[in-house]
Image: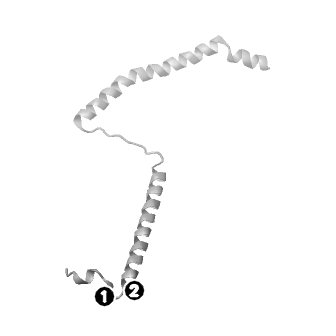
Amino acid sequence: MVKRLIKDRLNPLRRLDNATSALINMEHIYRDLPQSITRSLMRLEKGNFKMELEHKDLDKFTETLERITNRISMALLISSLIIGSSLVIMPNEALILQNFHI
């Protein structure tokens, strides 16, 4: 049984059949390719050419960017709270900016 399967797989007629079907598929490609290129070039000349791009791992980049933005925002908020509370605690005489009028 195994010999029969190997014999069938290595049969020259089967390989010829596979090669024939591959050539038929390639014939379709060679026949349609010039028309496709011509259509694409005509659309490009008219300005109707559209292209779709797929971004890989864009979601991961977006998540990382959001995390970084959140950390920077939190750091700015905490630093402003520290500076603001320091200004509230300081006596009025120690404020450097009190002599400047806006």
How far, Cα to Cα, is label 1 from label 2?
12 Å
> Which residue is at the far right?
1
SS for callout 2: helix
Q: Position of residue 37 (x, y in %)?
A: 33, 27
> Which residue is at the far bottom?
92
> Which residue is at the far left?
102
Q: Position of residue 18 (x, y in %)?
A: 58, 18
**Residue 93, numbered circle:** 1
Q: Amino acid at mark 2?
A: Ile
Image position of 18 with respect to 55: above or below: above
What residue is shown with label 2?
89
Image position of 25 with respect to 43: above or below: above
SS for callout 1: helix
Q: Residue at x 34, y 25 (%)?
A: 35
Image position of 78 with respect to 23: above or below: below
Number of marks in the rendered image: 2
Image quadrant in which the C terminus is located:
bottom left
> Which residue is at the far top?
12
Judge from the rendering whether residue 47 lies leftward or rightward of residue 28; answer left or right: left
Q: Residue at x 63, y 15 (%)?
A: 14
Q: Residue at x 24, y 38 (%)?
A: 47
Bin the neighbour count of mark 2 within 10 Å (Cα to Cα): few under 14, some 14-19, many 20 and up: few
Image position of 7 with respect to 74: above or below: above
